[in-house]
Image (cartoon, helix red, strand yellow):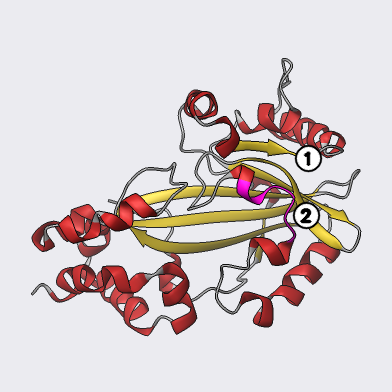
């Protein structure tokens, strides 16, 4: 199996890691019918997957028009909030950040593959508040991230990736409790097929008219067996797992998987 992304081969820690990429690479696709998947989740879990604050519609409308231009066809809102209509066109989750006062805040989002949080929990939060669960983020990275948001140009597209290990292949993962509770029941001999690398490919792009920043999240999930099938790739994963920064291990709770991962890495 070919892995789309393997960010653990570059760094086993939480870091900014943003790099410019061509505007044409904004979305990666890979979802045959994102509207069907997202509509089902919206019907079943409306407040978990969608939220907006008053005043965000101008930026939402600009984003919808930008996507229509990128895809070369009109996108009808059909009475929906513009960002929600835009999100039905892509596999990615779409998050809108706007500068309100002296802080960048999350003003609208469609979140159908959120990693352990819901739309209603994060709407309106600032960059500092959004990243508070990330061990060491405020002290080490917050000022740099705010500077990136302030200085981002409309003609620049930035990309970063991060990863975690989970015990479920589901894209929709608002609560880590059930998957973590299932860990003790995993057969160590089947760990390679029962554990999954969950990769988030994220991008940042400024909207030229409103000045809002669009934050996209595309989640890719691969079984650990896909890594274990290639000895060189498994060796790189093992190195990342064993040398991961303590802050990263604490934030991702990698210790919960240590025994199972060791079984895959060492084969004993």
In the image, residue 103 lies at what x, y percent?
Answer: 83, 62
Kindly identify which residue carries mark 2. 105
| 33 over 180 or under it: above or below | above
In the image, residue 34 lies at what x, y percent?
Answer: 51, 30
Mark 2 vs mark 1, CA separation in Å = 10 Å
Residue 12 shows in the view = no
Kindly identify which residue carries mark 1. 53
Quadrant location of the C terminus in the rendered image = bottom left
Q: Report which quarter residue 151 is drawn in.
A: bottom right
Q: Report which quarter residue 53 is drawn in.
A: top right
| 48 over 40 or under it: above or below | below
Residue range corresponding to the magenta coloring: 121-126
Viewer-closest of 115 and 222? 115
Helix, strand or loop at mark 2: strand
Q: Is residue 123 magenta?
A: yes
Q: Is residue 158 magenta?
A: no
* Labels 2 and 1: the sequence-earlier one: 1
Residue furthest top in the image: 78
């Amino acid at each position: 199996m070919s892995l789309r992304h393997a960010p653990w081969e570059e760094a086993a820690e939480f870091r900014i890691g943003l790099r410019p990429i061509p505007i044409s690479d904004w979305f990666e696709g890979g979802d045959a019918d994102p509207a069907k998947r997202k509509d089902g989740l919206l019907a079943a879990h409306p407040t978990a997957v969608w939220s907006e604050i008053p005043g965000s519609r101008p930026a939402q409308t600009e984003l919808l028009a930008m996507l229509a231009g990128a895809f070369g066809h009109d996108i009808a809102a059909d009475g929906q909030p513009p960002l929600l209509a835009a999100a039905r066109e892509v596999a990615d989750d779409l998050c809108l950040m706007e500068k309100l006062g002296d802080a960048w805040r999350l003003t609208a989002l469609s979140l159908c593959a959120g990693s352990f949080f819901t739309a209603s929990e994060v709407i309106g939060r600032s960059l500092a508040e959004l990243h508070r669960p990330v061990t060491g983020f405020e002290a080490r990275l917050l000022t740099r991230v705010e500077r990136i948001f302030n200085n981002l140009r409309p003609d620049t597209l930035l990309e970063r990736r991060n990863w975690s290990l989970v015990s479920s292949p589901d894209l929709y993962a608002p609560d880590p409790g059930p998957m973590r509770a299932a860990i003790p029941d995993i057969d160590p001999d089947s760990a390679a097929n029962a554990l999954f690398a969950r990769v988030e490919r994220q991008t940042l792009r400024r909207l030229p008219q409103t000045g809002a920043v669009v934050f996209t999240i595309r989640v890719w999930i691969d079984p650990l067996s896909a890594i274990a099938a290639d000895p060189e790739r498994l060796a790189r994963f093992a190195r990342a797992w064993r040398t991961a920064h303590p802050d990263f291990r604490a934030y991702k709770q990698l210790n919960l998987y240590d025994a199972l991962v060791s079984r895959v890495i060492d084969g004993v």
